[in-house]
Amino acid sequence: MLRAISLLLGATLLCGHGASARRVVSGQKVCFADVKHPCYKMAYFHELSSRVSFQEARLACESEGGVLLSLQDETEQKLIESMLQNLTKPGTGISDGDFWIGLWRNGDGQKSGACPDLYQWSDGSSSQFRNWYTDEPSCGSEKCVVMYHQPTANPGLGGPYLYQWNDDRCNMKHNYICKYEPEIHPTEPVDKPHLTNQPGDTHDNVVVTEAGIIPNLIYVIIPTIPLLLLILVAFGTCCFQMLHKSKGRTKTSPNQSTLWISKSMRKESGMEV
């Protein structure tokens, strides 16, 4: 029974850990359980004055050893979409706000050609995957690319302004997404990230700080409470049954008591004669 209890407790802890690892928290690096998948960070700023330009976003990612997001294929695009859906689900207080990705048109050393063909990834990736919104890129003075995230906007010709790409002026202020090399030990998200939201923030102070181990323990301990209560009830029941059986074995049976009395009475009768 103790072995079964241990297995149940271990399974609950693993489930709690897995649920925590799938959480997406603004400003916290999110990694996966293997070294094949990169790590990502969704940097969202509620205050418009705290959002950053393309170059500031790029420097912020590089200062942490990462790069501004490059996307290799549709699979990675869908992964980022699912993470943004988790981050911006109802009740989180996070709504409209596009995200810088690492695609841009800087004009340095580029040959002439059609405008869409001139965009390159800032991290040097050769990926040709694109997910432009209808009628984008518009080119001209708009050289840096954002991933749309405007759930409250009315749909346009290409549908809702969600997750497709749009070129924008590089000095515009947006959120951003960083990408990092895979980590052997994944970083778990924390419950209360710190977001700087003061006017005039630069890439030196837009980076979100990570909390300690206590918030992570909360996600592990809380799911185990029902199981611990069940274990305590089962253990108490077993102890009560064992104690009851032990008391039953120590009592003298009625037959033994009657037989003792009977023998004593016969001896007393004989003495009277």
Image (cartoon, rainbow, N blue to C red):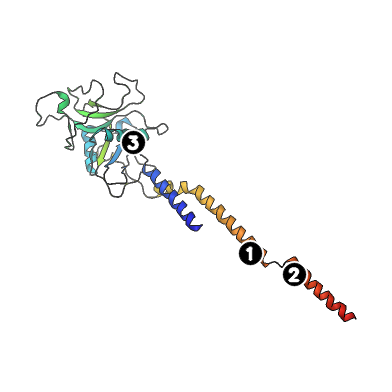
Which circle marks residue 256 in the picture?
2
At 11% from the left and 24% from the top, the residue drawn is 113
Pick whichever of labels 3 and 2 is earlier in the sequence: 3
Residue at the disc numbered 1: 246
Q: Is residue 229 left or right of residue 178?
A: right
- The residue carrying pointer 2 sits among few (fewer than 14), some (14 to 19) or many (20 or more) residues within 10 Å by Cα, namely few
- The residue carrying pointer 3 sits among few (fewer than 14), some (14 to 19) or many (20 or more) residues within 10 Å by Cα, namely some
Q: Secondary structure at mark 2?
A: helix
Dot 3 and dot 1 residues touching (CB under 8 Å): no
Residue 151: give x, y in percent of width and height: 35, 26
The alpha-carbon separation of the residues under discs 2 and 1 comes to 19 Å
Residue 193: give x, y in percent of width and height: 36, 41
Query: Of all residues shown, which one is farthest toward the top?
Result: 157
The alpha-carbon separation of the residues under discs 3 and 1 comes to 58 Å
- Where, by quadrant of the figure, is residue 273 drawn? bottom right
Nearest to the observer: residue 210 or residue 262: 262
What's under tag 3, amino acid-wise?
A: Met
What's under tag 1, amino acid-wise?
A: Ser
- Asked whether residue 200 is in view, the answer is no
Residue at the disc numbered 3: 83
What's under tag 2, amino acid-wise?
A: Gln
Q: Secondary structure at mark 3?
A: helix
Q: Is residue 140 left or right of residue 75?
A: left
Nearest to the observer: residue 15 or residue 60: 15
The alpha-carbon separation of the residues under discs 3 and 2 comes to 76 Å
